[in-house]
Image (spheres, rainbow, N blue to C red):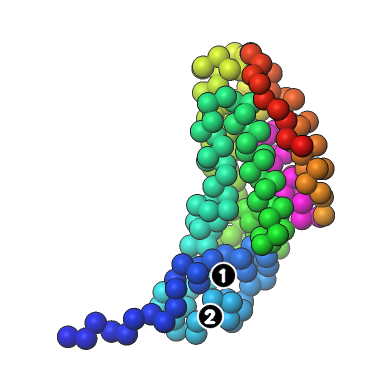
Amino acid sequence: MSRGRPRQFDPEKALDAALMLFWRHGYEGTSLAALADAMGINMPSLYGAFGNKESLFRKALARYIERPASYMSKALKTPDIRQAIKNMYQGAIDMVMEHDHPDGCLLVQGALASGPASEWVRHELTLRRGGAEAAVRRRLERAVEEGDLPTSTDPEQLARYLITVLWGMSVQAAGGATREQLFDISRQALRSLQVNHQRNTVLPR
């Protein structure tokens, strides 16, 4: 029995190419023809390997969370809360300043130009951003429980503030902000963490 012809392309590289296109132009600004061209495959192969455009976007979004945006989950594992938030901002700055990456953050930029027909994109990205905020809130709650933050801390409000700064840094980067300017913003945000004990943490320069 024939096993069929093997794929003539690397699905991992093709998905990376699709991610970069969605990241640069958003969902609506990226056509199937442009995707197929960037991925180096024909339309039947695209549908066969990744499904329709919506399915491909969801796969690209998962790829984004697992790779370029993985800085957040890694940072929040840091034992010291102030260092954890510092690492989160450092990771975000490194990502948006990477020359090989499109401007800004896909979770923010990807829905800015979505019309009614693509409302699900806006909803999906809103859920992803909400998930990021929830992860920061849980880490702050843990810091309160462990005594790193005062019991008077409101983890929900503080998480909303810290993550708003994070998304705002992405918009600033897309608008041409420099690395040093983004670090200045992160330093201001770090001052909102009223830690119970100081550690030997040096702010990035």
Q: Is residue 187 left or right of residue 148?
A: right
Count of all numbered marks drawn on residues in the image: 2
Q: Amino acid at mark 1?
A: Ala
Residue 201 magenta-drawn? no
Given residues 129 and 20, the one toward you in this image is 20
**Badge 1 vs badge 2, beta-carbon distance below 8 Å:** yes
Is any atom of residue 156 visible in this view? Answer: no
Query: Who comes first in sequence, dot 1 or dot 2?
Result: 1
User: What residue did someone put label 1 on?
Assistant: 17
Q: Residues within 10 Å of mark 1 (few under 14, many from 20)?
A: some
The magenta-colored residue range is 161-175
Q: Quadrant of residue 117?
A: bottom right
Q: Is residue 194 left or right of residue 138?
A: right
Q: Residues within 10 Å of mark 2 (few under 14, many from 20)?
A: some
Tag 2 secondary structure? loop
User: What residue did someone put label 2 on?
Assistant: 40
